Amino acid sequence: MLQIGSSDDPSSSPDYDVIARDLRELADDAAKQNPPIKLAYEMWAWGAHVNTWEHAWEICKRVDRPNFGVCLDTFQICARAYADPMSERRILASAQEQLSRSLADLTTVFSEPAAREKIFYFQISDGSRKVSPEELKKTAEEQGIPPLHAWSNAWRPLPFMDELEDENFQGYLPIVDVVEAVSPSHRIGLTRNYDCCLQVFYEEDMARDDPEVPKRWTAAAQKAHKKLIYELEMKV
């Protein structure tokens, strides 16, 4: 499977028919490979023209190829419908209302079997409020990227990290709500027909010159996965 992020180039075409045409051509080429390759299209929250799951789903429908589906991501969804790392409170003014509406629509759309088959990949990660808006702005300007991109690159811990590791990661996104919307059966890993992973980018800790970093984060991921399953089961 090949994962494709939405373009962050503002000079790229905003026409969804053009975007779908190009991706359809790529899907057709991928289908000719041996073995055939599936393409999972992910919206990036800082994308120029495709930056919500609704946008990505619209593109997917227009591409209309069996080997072309979507990649859903808890961080990317929340980064557009809930979070605002550049504000004092780190959330949108109407965060809960906006996210609830988006997740209700997501559950409705992907409750249809044909649509659900188009979820190829699901990524789970949190977002940290530890970085200040000023620091995030400075980093983004130095790297020449949008603040949301800079936030994504370096401030995405595992869910429940503060609780499980007793450290100061300050994750705050409503991850359980998003996972529940994507997998309303509450059986992650049992009834899903798509790949699922915990995805993290936490530079403050991961960039340390410490050979124990991979081991520490792998162990933390196992704990986070078990905790997530528990939280979902409590909602049944």
Image (cartoon, grey):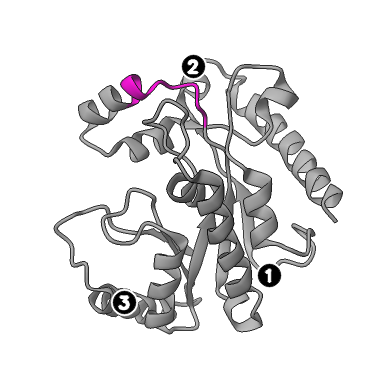
Judged by depth in the image, the label closer to the viewer, 1 or 2, is 1
Position of residue 86 relative to residue 108, above or below, is: above
Q: Which comes before the other along the chain, label 1 or label 2?
A: 1
Q: Position of residue 114 (x, y in %)?
A: 60, 83
Element type where label 2 sits in the image: loop
Instruction: Decide which of 12, 90 is in the foreground and name it.
Output: 90
Q: For the residues marked 3 and 1, what is the alpha-carbon distance in whole angstroms?
A: 24 Å
Judged by depth in the image, the label closer to the viewer, 3 or 1, is 3
Give the numbered dot on residue 20: 3
Position of residue 178 relative to residue 195, above or below, is: above
Q: Position of residue 13 (x, y in %)?
A: 18, 67
Disc count in the image?
Answer: 3
Q: Position of residue 171 (x, y in %)?
A: 58, 30
Give the numbered dot on residue 208: 2
Instruction: Please name the amino acid that badge 2 sits on.
Output: Arg
| Within-10-Å neighbours for mark 1: few <14, some 14–19, many 20+ | some
Instruction: Please name the amino acid that badge 1 sits on.
Output: Asn
